[in-house]
């Protein structure tokens, strides 16, 4: 029987080309067994303060992990949850730390058993997933941005695009309705009539319900696949009104922390596509509980995998595991935590990506890269 001998956090800060080279922050956790086998997990901590806090929490949570059998990963998850209720009830940095450790434990378990994560989950519902390019617009020229994103579909083979609005840069999408509609029209022309097209409000834009309705209706004229985060997650009444005035799928959820929170808003009936970030939603164990609720309510699961290859590996396996998944998002432009971190970065081919079949997550982070981008 193996025993866990150590838990080590690695915090990084890196420039993200898909976000206008703005700095982004992650915390990785490495869990080591007594035979030297290691498992890796990740939390998308996003800001300097939360990154520092998560590192400290991973170090403190280690006392509940070291000495345990790696096969008991779900019980370890439960015990961490029980200890952190005072400062992690319904979310917060405790969920970041728990996510990183939990993903690492599943990775370690798979490696020790010689099984890929998707097999540990119970088996893949499908062997490959449709892929869209998920990125941001930051150039002032709408024509430039439409053409740039159009090339992801026409030349690289992505099956569609999702654009984040309200982002840093000069594009200023999400602020002026006429400008936003013009961009969606140009984008549809650039990607062609059949490609999927998603627009994401982001988190900094103060849209009213009327704004959301007007934009969504106008976007729908150009073949909108879904509108994402059109309102603040707490605005349940606003989502209900929006639903009465639009035909497209409504996506939300990426800011939720844990299974009970997901369950409560899914059961309101406001959401069609549930965005769930494995690196903040209490890891693989937490996300499996979210998927149970998704399947029970006949909505769609969408992994918000916009961080490292570790998160992407876990996301692909979970997305392939459930029949209630439409696609996988990938960042199209080369970036440090996808293309430098692992020897074989995740890429789509012909608009699809295969499910990893190597033991555990199927990826092994390069610690030299983590040290090169170390945040302290």
Image (spheres, rainbow, N blue to C red):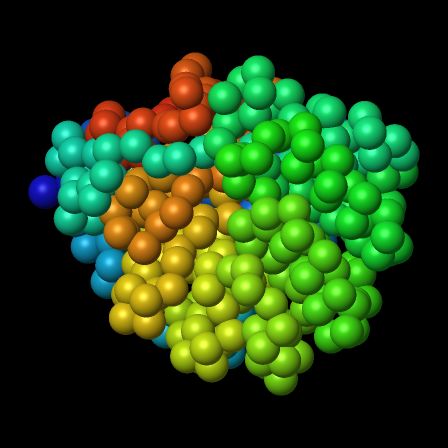
Q: Quadrant of residue 160?
A: top right
Q: Residue at x 35, y 36 (%)?
A: 129
The number of callouts visible is 0
Left or right: where 74 falls relative to 186: left
Question: Between residues 343 and 233, which one lies in front from this camera angle?
Answer: 233
Left or right: where 128 falls relative to 112: right
Question: Between residues 228 and 1, which one lies in front from this camera angle?
Answer: 228
Q: Residue at x 60, y 67 (%)?
A: 246
Question: Between residues 234 and 349, which one lies in front from this camera angle?
Answer: 349
Q: Position of residue 28 (x, y in %)?
A: 50, 40
Quarter of the figure with the C terminus: top right
Question: Between residues 100 and 195, which one lies in front from this camera angle?
Answer: 195
Q: Is residue 77 above or below residue 372?
A: below
Q: Is residue 205 above or below residue 148?
A: below
Q: Position of residue 372 (x, y in %)?
A: 63, 22
Work out whether residue 245 can be spotted.
yes
Quarter of the figure with the N terminus: top left
Q: Position of residue 319 (x, y in %)?
A: 34, 46
């Amino acid at each position: 029987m193996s025993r866990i001998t150590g838990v080590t956090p690695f915090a990084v800060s890196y420039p993200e080309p898909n976000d206008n080279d703005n700095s982004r922050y992650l915390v990785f956790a490495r869990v080591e067994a007594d035979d030297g086998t290691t498992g890796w997990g990740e939390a998308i901590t996003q800001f300097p303060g939360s990154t520092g806090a998560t590192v400290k929490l991973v170090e403190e949570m280690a006392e509940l992990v070291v000495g345990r059998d790696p096969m008991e990963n779900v019980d370890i998850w439960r015990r961490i949850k029980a200890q952190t209720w005072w400062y992690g009830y319904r979310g917060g940095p405790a969920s970041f730390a728990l996510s990183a450790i939990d993903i690492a434990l599943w990775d370690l378990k798979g490696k020790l058993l010689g099984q890929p994560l998707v097999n540990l989950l119970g088996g893949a519902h499908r062997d490959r997933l449709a892929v869209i390019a998920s990125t941001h617009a930051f150039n002032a020229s709408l024509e430039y941005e439409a053409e740039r994103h159009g090339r992801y579909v026409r030349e690289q083979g992505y099956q569609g695009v999702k654009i984040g609005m309200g982002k840093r840069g000069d594009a200023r999408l999400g602020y002026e309705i006429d400008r936003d509609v013009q961009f969606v029209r140009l984008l549809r022309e650039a990607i062609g009539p059949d490609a999927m097209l998603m627009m994401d409000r982001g988190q900094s834009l103060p849209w009213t319900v009327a704004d959301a309705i007007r934009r969504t209706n106008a976007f729908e004229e150009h073949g909108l696949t879904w509108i994402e985060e059109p309102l603040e997650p707490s605005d349940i009444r606003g989502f209900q009104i929006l639903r009465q005035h639009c035909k497209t799928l409504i996506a939300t959820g990426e800011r939720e922390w844990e299974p009970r929170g997901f369950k409560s808003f899914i059961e309101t009936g406001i959401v069609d596509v549930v965005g769930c970030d494995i690196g903040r939603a209490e890891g693989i164990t937490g996300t499996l509980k979210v998927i149970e609720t998704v399947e029970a309510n006949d909505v769609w699961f969408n992994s918000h995998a916009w961080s490292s290859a570790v998160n992407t590996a876990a996301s692909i396996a979970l997305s392939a595991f459930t029949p209630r998944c439409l696609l996988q998002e990938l960042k199209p432009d080369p970036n440090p935590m996808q293309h430098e971190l692992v020897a074989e970065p995740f890429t789509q081919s012909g608009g699809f990506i295969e499910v990893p079949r190597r033991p555990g997550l199927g990826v092994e982070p390069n610690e030299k890269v983590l040290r090169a981008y170390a945040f302290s």
